Amino acid sequence: MNLYFRFFSMMLTSWFKSAIDIFAPFTTRHIVWPSDLDLLGHINNGRYFTITDNVRVEMMIRAGLWQAIRKEKFYPVIAGETAQFRKPLLPFQRYEIVTRFSGWDDKFLYVEHTFKSKRGVHALLMVKIRIISDSARRISPKEMLDLIPDADVDAINVCHIVDKWNESSLNHWQQLES
């Protein structure tokens, strides 16, 4: 229930907040609620991913991209996720998430989420996103990003970390299939 409240609250308030540049780092502020906790008394590992889902939707709404992709009947779907955890987030602790594009290639968008507080960096999540249409047609990231007014999306700027992640994932899948 807590997640629905967070989602609907974010959806309602996002429309009234200032517009953002989708290519600039985007910071949101949060608090750890008791419903976010696991049996060890810190934020549940899976909750990180759920919270970042909401952050990405807010980012797209405030950048004007959400309306454009809904009009075109495009849907962002998660193709891969990875996380690294350094410090636990504890009950009622305030933290922020800094979200930024790590780049895109001909198939995927890459988004990085960094969880921070006064105590330092707590977690880093990387997300690989594929864009599809309602007819299941695969949409290139450039085609979707071209929907943003005045956006310069000609450069494909995947960072080396993403390249290593993709290479590692490909090797892993090949081992599983052999």
Image (cartoon, helix red, strand yellow):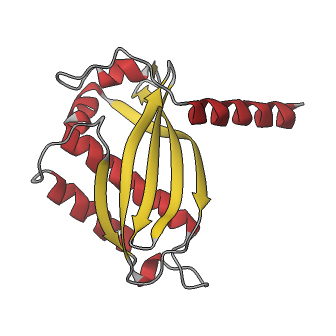
Quarter of the picture containing the C terminus is top right
The residue at 29%/48% (across/down) is: 26
Q: Nearer the viewer, residue 51 or 97?
A: 97
Compared to 46, does 61 lie above or below? above
Instruction: Please state the horizontal and vertical placement of residue 22, each as a whole percent of the image.
Output: 27, 37
Residue 1 visible (yes or no):
no
Quarter of the picture containing the N terminus is bottom left
Compared to 48, does 143 lie above or below? above
Find residue 168 and report its image quarter. top right
How many numbered discs? Answer: 0
Residue reaching furthest right? 178
Instruction: Please state the horizontal and vertical placement of residue 113, each as a whole percent of the image.
Output: 44, 51
Compared to 115, does 137 lie above or below? above
Find residue 94 and report its image quarter. bottom left
Q: Nearer the viewer, residue 152 or 56?
A: 152
The residue at 35%/18% (across/down) is: 143
Q: Nearer the viewer, residue 29 or 117?
A: 117
